[in-house]
Amino acid sequence: MKKLLSLVLCMMLSLFALPLLTVSRPAAGTDEPAARTAADEPAALPAAAPESWDQRQTVTVCVDGEKRAFDLRSYLIGVMAAEMPASFPEEALKAQAVAARTYTLYKQALYGADKMPESHHGAQLCTDPNHCKAWCDVAVQAASLWGDSSALYLEKLTAAVDGTDGMILVYEGKPIAAVFHSASAGRTENAADVWGTDVPYLRSVESPGGEQSPKYRAEVRVSQSAFAAAMKALEPSCSFSGAAAGWFRDSRRSEAGGVISVVVGGARVRGALVRQAAGLNSANFRVAADGADLVFTTTGCGHGVGMSQYGARALAREGRDYTEILLHYYSGAQLLKKSA
């Protein structure tokens, strides 16, 4: 039964997850000092300690349609560069490194040797953030990501990975689905409210700092016809007729404010499905008709489950270390250091 729930959770994560953060060069006023070196040549990763557990592990990843093998350390540094701004505080980056390492091991255990998706072309993971985790080749892309700050930020991400070497989150002795998102609207979401599957370590908790995200509040305008077509493709029982003001009714919201479900075109659907159809930052939305369009306003960014990246940033700024951050967001999970 537990295996079945894990498979269901993975399928729901793959269906409804959307990109979390758009990583770009740090702007003025971010957490980090000015760059100290220029990056005009391919970057090289700092050497790992001889006893590095991460470097002894191998992970296969589908990159541009081809299966490639990496040591876990190198892969995680590429994930970090793609998933969280390197300007974030050290303890937030460490929390992200542990979450990414844990999720990698969770996926490896879930798929095993013979259950990998066809889209992976024989690899354990892929670089599609909608399905696994985003990843970039820092040796090639460091300069385009960080410009003159390349050496500084690559060193910082590497330190976050090495500083948590082999550290993972477990529940009942197994790596957890350590999902994360960009910014919560004051609280994280229960996994059951978003994906319909209860996960004991993915429960709603208070989460500060979300309002610091540039995507915390957003507005999306979509034509009524385009939205109706997108919804019908996802849920054929939806029927759109009459004034658009009457298309939406009886929404049910979570404790965190996200739409668990809502009647759309006569059919009750999950809020995550509306988010997908309209291309919204989150399922915490309001909608109004405006002429031939629908206007959605959202709060927060991402699915809202698990660790909030801006929440981790806020907690780190308050003086919390990465272990406190992780155990706050993944209720009931335990930290375990792999050494063999």
Image (tube, helix red, strand yellow):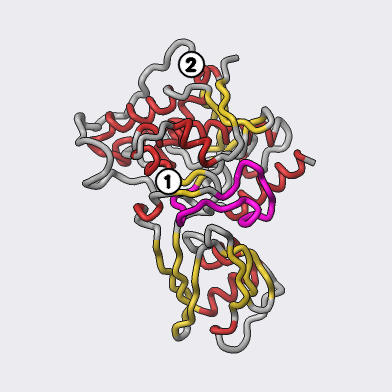
Please state if 179 lies on the left or on the right of 195 as rendered: left
Q: Position of residue 91 (x, y in %)?
A: 39, 32
For disc 2, the marked residue is 52
Label 1 CA crowd tier, 10 Å (few <14, some 14–19, many 20+)? many
- Residue occupying the point 44% across, 62% down: 299
Identify the residue at the far right of this view: 1
Label 2 sits on a secondary structure element that is: loop
Q: Nearer the viewer, residue 322 or 40?
A: 322
- Mark 1 or 2, nearer chain start: 2
Q: Main secondary structure of the magenta part?
A: loop
| Tag 2: amino acid | Ser
Q: Decide: marks 1, 2 in contact (CB < 8 A)?
A: no
Identify the residue at the far bottom of this view: 242
| Start-end of magenta stretch | 181-204
In the image, residue 177 sits, relative to residue 163, either above or below, namely: below
In the image, residue 55 sits, relative to residue 325, either above or below, namely: above
Badge nearest the viewer, 1 or 2: 1
Please state if 313 lies on the left or on the right of 259 as rendered: left
Label 1 sits on a secondary structure element that is: helix
In reply to whether residue 203 is colored magenta, the answer given is yes
Q: Position of residue 190 (x, y in %)?
A: 60, 52
Q: Position of residue 37 (x, y in %)?
A: 20, 29
For disc 1, the marked residue is 311
Q: Quadrant of the N terminus?
A: top right
In the image, residue 192 sits, relative to residue 86, either above or below, namely: below
Label 2 CA crowd tier, 10 Å (few <14, some 14–19, many 20+)? some
- Residue occupying the point 41% across, 49% down: 208
Q: Position of residue 115 (x, y in %)?
A: 72, 37
